[in-house]
Image (spheres, rainbow, N blue to C red):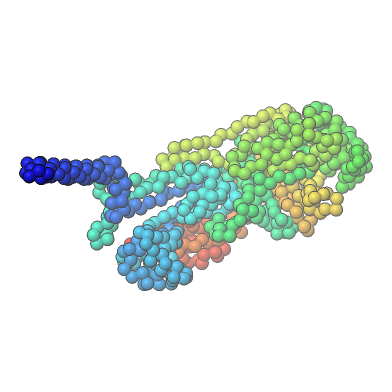
Amino acid sequence: MNGQPSPQSSTGSSDREFGQRLGLTGLFMALFFVAIVFKLLSIQVISVRKYKAMASRQYESVVTENARRGRIYDRNGRQLAESIESISFYADPQHVKNPQELATRFATRFGRNRLTYLRLLQSKKRFVWLERNVPVATASDLMGLKMPGLRFQREQQRYYLNIASQIIGFTDRDNQGISGLERQLNADLKGRDGTTIFQRSATGERYPAPDADQIPPLSGSDVELTIDSDIQGIVEDEIIRAVMNFKAKAAAGIVMDVRTGEILAMANYPGFDMNQRANVTSQDTRNRSVTDMFEPGSTFKVVMASAATESLHYTSQTMVDGHNGVVQLYDRRIVDHDPMGRITFQEAIMHSSNVVAALTAMKVGPETYYRYAHDLGFGQKTGVGLIGESRGILKEIKDWDRTTLPWMGYGYQIMATPLQILQAYATIANDGVRMRPYVIRRIVDREGQPVRENKPVKVVQAVKPETARYMAREYFSAVVEKGTGTSAAVAGIQVAGKTGTAQKYTGGYKGQHAYLSTFVGFFPVSSPQYAAIVVVDEPQTAYYAAAVAAPVFSRICGRSVACSREMQQRLAMRSTEKSNLERIATVAVPELKGLTGREAERLLKWNGLGVEFAGNPDELVLQQSVEAGSKVQSKQVVRLTLAQRPH
């Protein structure tokens, strides 16, 4: 029996092994239980949002309802920009039963490759756009399709009256501003989009989730401009005519209220069609009136005349020497277009003597001359509130050389924008007070309550009131009455102003033949109310401002007074030209098919046309009696045939 284990020791060993195995099993079960509890805690507590979102994606979808974008109005309450309804189609590829048929229908309707739609419909995604911002007229038959997985939503599409394109700008396909005030004021205009959460039943049908927070859309704020759409249209028409007549490169025109600084019109050429902007370039959208700088030439003599009148005590009858039209300064010569000898200071301004301007500026001195240039608004932004505005260039005195002052006397070695030049003359017209120009009158919320509002702001008293009135009466009215600006005269209104024919620097002046023709002025001289400027860039068939810009100024001011009741009331005058203009005025009929009768009526009223309905005005326009694009007389009635809206 020696060396053999006893029965008792064998039993004890087995019990220990069994206990160890039982302990390990219990430990494993405990760990397994802890893992299950931890996983449940992770799902139900720690990562609850993640798993809720995963579950929601299986049976919920979120549809965005675009907010109505704010409208843009002119000073008289006329709508310049409005959002109208368009249709966007989308699909859930997993619920589309017959992608081949659906792709064929869309390819037929929109003229695109069938495979384009088929690839979208075979996507693994749960949401794909098929078409965006489709006119209701084009989308109407597809809106009635009852095909599983296909849906549409009504969106907003921007429509413009098609004036002041560089000021207003435009939006992209998502109704976001990308140019002009549409971009600058996008936060105010866009509002807040709403969201609706839908749940999906087992059959794929959608219904609004009963326990979800549905967010309604919040309309954007409306914007009221200082622009008068009638005057804006006149300025655009006249500068286009000038470009065509003189084969010019570009042109700009601005009309301003000298008492308040309000901009009544600001037009630029080239422009673009705001409702057909597929090929619009950055050059088209550039607001040249505030972005483009140039040497202003003789229009800058307003600085010289102001400084001479106040610091040198010149009067209209002060005798000055024109040196027979030629003067040698350092290694350069200044030459007048007509030789003049001993003349009055008034005659020097009337006939735009560069020789007298240069010599007078030198007598004034650099510090005084710089102060007047600065106070009249040069070398600094006007504060008009438009993106892209340039400061111009007015060099600090320390950066001047010996030729700077005499050359600045007649408008060279200085860079200015059209608005800066206009602002200087408006300052003279306003008893020497420089006002801040502005184009945004106010922004109002959806309740009609002002959010922000601009008021007239006095910037500085640039010259004394008596000096300003004297200059208007004795210098600049003489330019129009018997000087270089006679072609700027307006029948029945006394006009003051100045011509400017500036040679452009294109790598050098000698031998170059590129010019800027400018006329800037204000009226009436006895109590100035309005100022305007016309700039024609590189005219080819003529270049003197007297022949190019001044007649355009005359037509703009004459037509503006004729059509504007506000101008007529402030000027206390009546004009027979208004009735003549109304008689010959024509407008283009817009495309109305597919809009509701109410929307079409609004667009027709925008364009000064009447409307007659054949059917329910809440239904869609099927036909219009006058073809889109046709030119008709103002107030003509367009008959609309309406059809039932598809659901």
**Residue 7: image x %, image y %?**
6, 44
Q: Position of residue 378 (x, y in %)?
A: 71, 36
| Horizontal arrangement in the rendering, residue 276 relative to residue 289 (left or right) | left
Residue under the image location 44 percent in, 59 percent down: 132
The correct choice, above or below, for 533 with respect to 201 in the image is: above
Residue drawn at the location 85% of the way across and 30% of the way down = 363
529, 504: nearer the viewer: 504
User: Where does the C terminus fall, quadrant-wise?
Assistant: bottom left
Query: Which quarter of the picture shows residue 145?
Result: bottom left
Work out which quarter of the rendered image holds the N terminus and state it. top left
Residue 312 place in picture, x, y as percent: 83, 28
Does the image show residue 520? yes
- Rendered view: 179 above or below 345: below
With respect to residue 79, does 377 lie above or below? above
Between 414 and 261, the one lying in front of the other is 414
Residue 198 shown left or right of residue 131 in the figure = left
Residue farthest along the front direction in this orientation: 2
Residue sitting nearer the eye, 169 or 255: 169
At 43% across and 58% down in the image, what residue appears?
A: 86
The residue shown at (70%, 59%) is 244
For the question of whether residue 563 can be seen, the reply is no
Q: Is residue 460 left or right of residue 51?
A: right
x, y (%) of residue 544?
80, 51
Residue 162 placement: quadrant: bottom right
